[in-house]
Image (spheres, coloured by chain):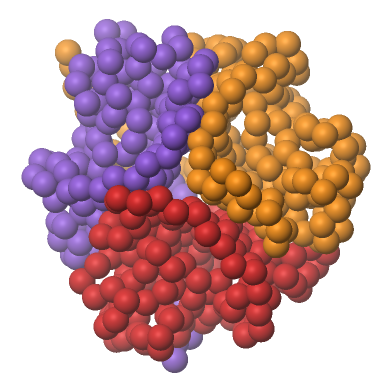
Amino acid sequence: MTMTLIATSTVGAGGAASISFTGIPQTGTDLLVVFSLRSDGTASFFKVQVNGDTGSNYPFKRLTGTGSSVASAGATLDGFYVGGLTNTNETSNTFENGQLYICNYTSNVAKSASADNVTENNATAATQDIRAFSWTGTSAITSMVVTPGGGNFAQYSTASLYTITKGSGGATVA
Amino acid sequence: MPNIGFWATAGAGGGAGIPAYEHIATVYGNSSSSISFSSIPSTYKHLQIRSVAVSTASDSQADWFKIRFNDDSSTTYWSHYTQGYNAGGGLASYGFSLTGGNLAAFTNTIFNSGTTNVSPSIIDIVDYASTTKNKTMKCLSGVIRDDAYDRVVISSGSWPSTAAINKISLIVNSGNGFASTSRFSLYGIKG
Amino acid sequence: MPTQTYVPLANLTLSSSQTTVTFSSIGQGYGDLVFVFAGSCLSGSADFYIRLNGDTGGNYDRWFMQGDGANTETFGNAGDSPFRVSRAVLAPGELTNITMNVMAYSATDKHKTVLIRGNNASRSTEAYMGRWGSSAAVNSITLLLGGGFSFAAGSTFALYGIAS
């Protein structure tokens, strides 16, 4: 099977400071994380750190629309900063919709990744965001932690982790 | 506040190690102005719609279709999109409200290249069966006509309802139809 | 056992540098194809080319938007050959990943359209719409680099079918 659910985590009453996945099976090729998140405060972004790496080892480039303008930025930060996070400044009961895709997560070389993420709001302002990432770590990814940029994730926030598993053969080279 | 840790081993979460992506239904255009997926099971976590579409409009401009949930035609939905566009405006971002649906994706019309030049889109709806969350969708789509209406678009939308989604309708904005070369496939993603 | 929907069709990890990789005799039993590349090139700064059915004619149109960390851009070409990802390019020591959805690839009543995300954290992230102006079913995909550059060893190419 190509796309396999590994786990889903749902934040309960009172919120949560983070969501984590540990003991990630090493049987897949790529990782896909699907998010439906909200801050219970005013945090406007969230990040994913793998293998406990909190160092500045995650370079990125982004393209972001805000409902009225478009901009690009890039940096090297301490996690995959996936994109915007819907918060208490925005319409109640509304959560962001995003995904993070990490290629070749079991390899012993640096990793390449991407993210597509949107927030929503009953107003002109909301973000549509695409990102390119890499992670300089050369170990297989066995764990990840998702954290908001301050405060907690609100109740009912979810993150679902999947593996994508490649086939074998079927290509020619020249 | 607690950290939510999750051991990603078989059996954890009640769904670990299971095939996650399943085809639910495919619908083809038949010149009517809308297509629908009804009686959507609530047993998945997320939904994805993969489509190619062309509108039967003879308008020289591109058309677009909106997405409506549970036949809710009266609620104000909010839509946002960021597009790279060949015409004036270039790379720009917009947000606006619509009654009865979110802007989902732009499409080509038969004015340009007949029914063979379709426009693709991939729509993701997360936590569609939740009864505590409003519904947020995102979409990657594009139109190529070799004219000023070429574009690539990331769109998003909010249906401000905590009802579980059991029906999705895609409706051509111009009131024209989806040509027969249009194809819409709905997938469920477990979680 | 439920019918598989997201099916691995083929994959390749390069054990040495190569100039082209081809998936041929692609089965026609699916709705869409998903292609995923991750890797680098041996030398130069190379656009990533995608050729369908060996078509070397000017039958490829594209429109994209991208951000390079400072600037934003939207741009396109008609009558190009072939599809080319030209901002999230490959370069030695940099990682690029590209995901391409080939929509309705097996249909014979419509042109073939692709939605691509190209990503190089050192250069650009781009969203890309492409059209191959042929109604033929796609039965082969060839990946190569502009300028005659080579894919580096360790680069990976994976192809999946999505049933519909």
Q: Residue C53 is drawn in which quadrant?
A: bottom right
Viewer-closest of B181 and C49 = C49
Q: Residue at x 27, y 12 (%)?
A: A41
| Residue B57 horizontal side relative to residue C84, left or right | right
The image shows residue B10, relative to residue A9, as above or below, that is below
Q: Can you give x and y, in whole percent of width and height, for residue A67 in the image? A: 48, 29
Viewer-closest of C58 and A110 = C58
Write down which chain is painted purple.
Answer: A
Q: Can you give x and y, in whole percent of width and height, for residue A8 in the image? A: 37, 31
Write down which chain is painted red.
Answer: C
Q: Can you give x and y, in whole percent of width and height, for residue C69 in the image? A: 29, 51
The image quadrant where one finds the C terminus of chain B is top left
The image shows residue B163, relative to residue B125, as above or below, that is above
Q: Residue at x 78, y 32 (%)?
A: B173
Count of picture labels = 0
The image quadrant where one finds the N terminus of chain B is top left
In the image as oriented, which residue stretches furthest toward the left? A55
Q: Can you give x and y, in whole percent of width and height, for residue C88 in the image? A: 38, 63
Q: Residue at x 35, y 11 (%)?
A: A88
What colour has chain B?
Answer: orange
The image shows residue B40, relative to residue A102, as above or below, that is above
| Residue C133 horizontal side relative to residue A39, left or right | right
Inspect this view and state whether residue C30 appears.
no
